[in-house]
Amino acid sequence: EGVKMALKVLKEYYAKEDKSHQAAQGAGEGIIGLLEVVESDFTKGLAEMTSTEESAQAAYEAETKENEVEKTTKEQDVKYKSKESTELDQTVAETSSDRAGVQEELDAALEYLKKIEEQCVAKAETFEEREARFEAELSGLKEALRVLEDETATLLQTGTTSARRAAKRRQRLLRKSTALAA
């Protein structure tokens, strides 16, 4: 504005028909030309700054709007994620509780199965157990044989019919003990 005012004043001054400034007319035209160049440069610079400022303002506003949208989106994400997290925590708690109950039922069922297996499942007898049982049976048969021999001897002294029966019993026991020994 100041340059425009100066140009106007100078142009009016040198446009007068007054000849008092005739000698400085060339210098005045040089100053006016210089001021016109300055005005042109200022106008051009102002236009560039205005354009730059406007584009910067538009970019700022666009970025601000984009940031607001992004902020709103992220706030909603946080809200939904928090809700989902709470629901998942609740589901985990319920599932853990359910698992504990099912584990207790499983433990009880396994305990019951173990008791039933002890009662129902036949266990194979070990070699040592069979050998001990066989030895006990064999010693019992030997003892019975000795008793029968003693009875037979007594019966032989007392009578023949009883002696025959005792001898038959003795032979049966003897065959049985030999069969077991084999």
Image (cartoon, helix red, strand yellow):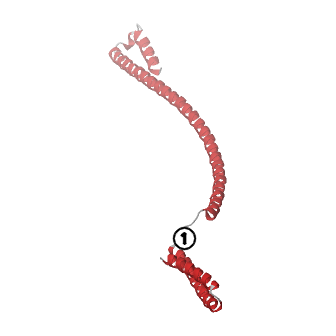
The single residue placed furthest to the left in the displayed view is 26
- Mark 1 neighbour density, 10 Å: few (under 14) some (14–19) many (20 or more): few
Q: Position of residue 125 (x, y in %)?
A: 54, 70
- Give the residue drawn at x 63%, y 91%: 154
Residue type at mark 1 is Glu
Q: Position of residue 58 (x, y in %)?
A: 49, 25
* Above or below: residue 161 compared with residue 179: below
Q: Position of residue 23 (x, y in %)?
A: 33, 15
User: Foreground residue, 175 or 44?
Assistant: 175
User: Foreground residue, 113 or 127?
Assistant: 127
Q: How many marks?
A: 1
- Give the residue drawn at x 60%, y 35%: 76
Q: Position of residue 8 (x, y in %)?
A: 44, 14
User: Which image quadrant for residue 135?
Assistant: bottom right
The residue tagged 1 is: 125
- Give the residue drawn at x 63%, y 84%: 161
Find numbered disc 1 in the image and state the secondary structure of the residue it sits on.
loop
* Above or below: residue 112 compared with residue 8: below
